[in-house]
Image (spheres, helix red, strand yellow):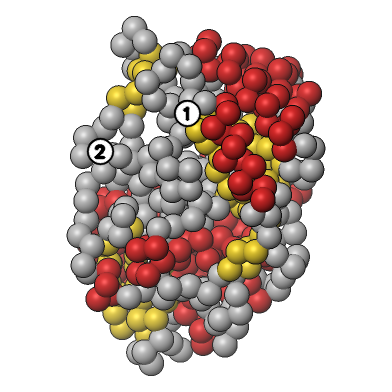
Amino acid sequence: MPKIIDAKVIVTCPGRNFVTLKIITEDGVYGLGDATLNGRELSVASYLQDHVIPCLIGRDAHRIEDIWQYLYKGAYWRRGPVTMSAIAAVDTALWDIKGKLAGLPVYQLLGGASRESVMVYGHANGTTIEDTVKVALEYQAQGYKAIRIQCGVPGMASTYGVSKDKYFYEPADADLPTENVWNTSKYLRVVPELFKAAREALGWDVHLLHDIHHRLTPIEAGRLGKDLEQYRPFWLEDATPAENQEAFKLIRQHTTTPLAVGEIFNSIHDCRELIENQLIDYIRATVVHAGGISHLRKIANLADLYQVRTGCHGATDLSPVCMAAALHFDLSVPNFGVQEYMRHTAETDAVFPHAYTFENGAMHPGEAPGLGVDIDEELAAKYEYNRAFLPVNRLEDGTMFNW
């Protein structure tokens, strides 16, 4: 058996913070797992270092499912983003090791490819509708078949989800949380105009997506979905906070616009009712926040029974290790829908050299054994951790916004 003899946590900040777990076996084979939890990175690093790594030493690296169950059930305090991100890092690293020992890319161990490549969507955003459409046209020219469109809300100083840079976006932007101001009425007026302009400029052969970022009540989300039906959105993402899964029933009653949710989910229990009651069309859970490849496969298997497709989160707060793991997962599952793709900076790509590629609106994880991603530890050490928080929202009267 390939016995685990060491493991370590690597924290680096090549433009933004990443937490990486490296598990090493007695024969020198090692695997990497992403443990990044945006805005709470050191919580997961501590959980791994203080509570998980001591339990891994001496175990058989091949026993992925058994180790997953041990870490999940053995902790007693189950679930939660910190615990599940830590478990995900272990799980992903073990799949990386298994692939390297087998001499196969991870997707082959998951049953092989279900498609030739993975359709991805890029982010087009701008301060104005015109700016957003201009960027969307650039993405279309690069071969993207799916594009997320977001624009600033007139009268608002800033809008979460709209970056200053048209390609790179990092929402964790300050040493203490930035406070944004929000107005729902103004937002609901501008989004239909954005979709109208985008359809006129881009035509009907490109998928258009939009992220609400949990900022609407169910009835408001239903109204927006209904207003957008004529423009055939690919999906509306995170329409309302999903702690109350039944809230999506009200949205379903008022619109046929497809719904996606789940980037902040960390277990199958967060989405079980949404899937079983067919209240969503795409599940957005991702490898690092939902317990790793092993647990995400369980979510995908449940979703497949109800014709719900995957649409994994893929923002830049997920390292190239997680991006690779997502692509191996995407390539293998039968009910894949789309993969979010936000390109990393050159500094990040240098720290995490990888085999995955992008071409004509689609990606492929490559044929390297394991995940096909490495880490340059010497280079990573040059980028020290930099505390950064995600922003919070308040209404114009100062009320803390529940999103």
Closer mark to the observer between disc 2 and disc 1: 1
Question: What residue type is disc 1 on?
Answer: Thr
- Specify whether 347 is left or right of 151: left
| Residue 85 quadrant | bottom left
| Residue 191 quadrant | top right
- Give the percent coordinates (x, y) of residue 9: 28, 67
5 versus 288 height, above or below: below
35 versus 78 height, above or below: below
Question: What residue type is disc 2 on?
Answer: Ala
156 versus 357 height, above or below: above
The answer to whether residue 17 shows anywhere in this view is: yes
Query: Helix, strand or loop at disc 1?
Result: loop
- Specify whether 156 is left or right of 193: left
| Residue 236 quadrant | top right
Q: Residue furthest top?
A: 397
Q: Which residue is mark 2?
A: 174
Q: Quadrant of the C terminus?
A: top left
Q: Residue at x 48, y 43 (%)?
A: 166
Q: Residue at x 33, y 37 (%)?
A: 390
- Specify whether 353 is left or right of 53: right
Q: Residues within 10 Å of mark 2 (few under 14, many from 20)?
A: some
Which of the pair 167/92 is nearer the observer?
167
Which of the pair 47/177 is nearer the observer?
177
The answer to whether residue 4 shows anywhere in this view is: no
Q: Do the numbered discs 2 and 1 sit on residues whose CB atoms are within 8 Å?
A: no
- Give the percent coordinates (x, y) of residue 160: 43, 30
Q: Which residue is mark 1?
A: 127
Q: Residues within 10 Å of mark 1 (few under 14, many from 20)?
A: some
- Give the percent coordinates (x, y) of residue 45: 27, 58
- Give the percent coordinates (x, y) of residue 217: 55, 17
Q: Residue at x 21, y 39 (%)?
A: 175
